[in-house]
Amino acid sequence: MIKIEHIGIAVSNLESASLMYEKLFGTPSYKQEEVVNERVKTAFFRNGPNKIELLEATNPESPIAKFILQKGEGIHHIAFEVEDIIFEIDRLKNEGFIVLDEVPKKGADNKIVAFLHPKSTNGVLIELCQEIR
């Protein structure tokens, strides 16, 4: 079963974007962390059953910095929670999707992650994520 885990939003300034989302949701982020291997700082917000991840680049060569340079701030990806990420990577690869990470990598919020290329998902970057057990 695949369900939406969170929506990732690329921002230029995590602090000011976090303040705006605190006002919007009426609550502060529940978690902030840096994911060194992805060169990004994150802040997570909950709104009911929904989660939003704000992402700020820590390096001008990071994927988030390049995304903002090309497209500006905004929705970067939709993340889907999976029970078995290895199984889903293989299944989706066999279904014809372009898998960017054939081996899952450590992501934020205690997850391992893998991405599907937007060319194979109607222009949307898809993140698969599984809780680290």
Image (spheres, rainbow, N blue to C red):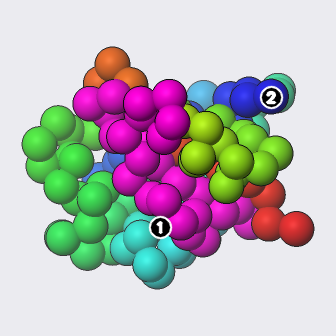
**Which residue range is magenta in the image?**
93-120
* Quadrant that contains the N terminus: top right
Q: Give the residue type at disc 1.
A: Lys
Q: Residues within 10 Å of mark 1 (few under 14, many from 20)?
A: many
Q: Which residue is mark 2?
A: 1
| Residue 99 within the magenta-colored segment of the rendering | yes
Q: Which labelled disc corresponds to residue 114?
A: none
Q: CA distance from mark 1 to mark 2?
A: 29 Å
The location of residue 127, given as percent across then percent down, is 53, 44
Q: Is residue 106 visible?
A: yes
Look at the numbered disc 2 and give the secondary structure of its residue: loop
Q: Earlier in the sequence, mark 1 or mark 2?
A: 2
Residue found at x 53% / y 74%:
34
Residue found at x 38% / y 59%:
56
Q: Give the residue type at disc 2.
A: Met
| Residue 2 within the magenta-colored segment of the rendering | no
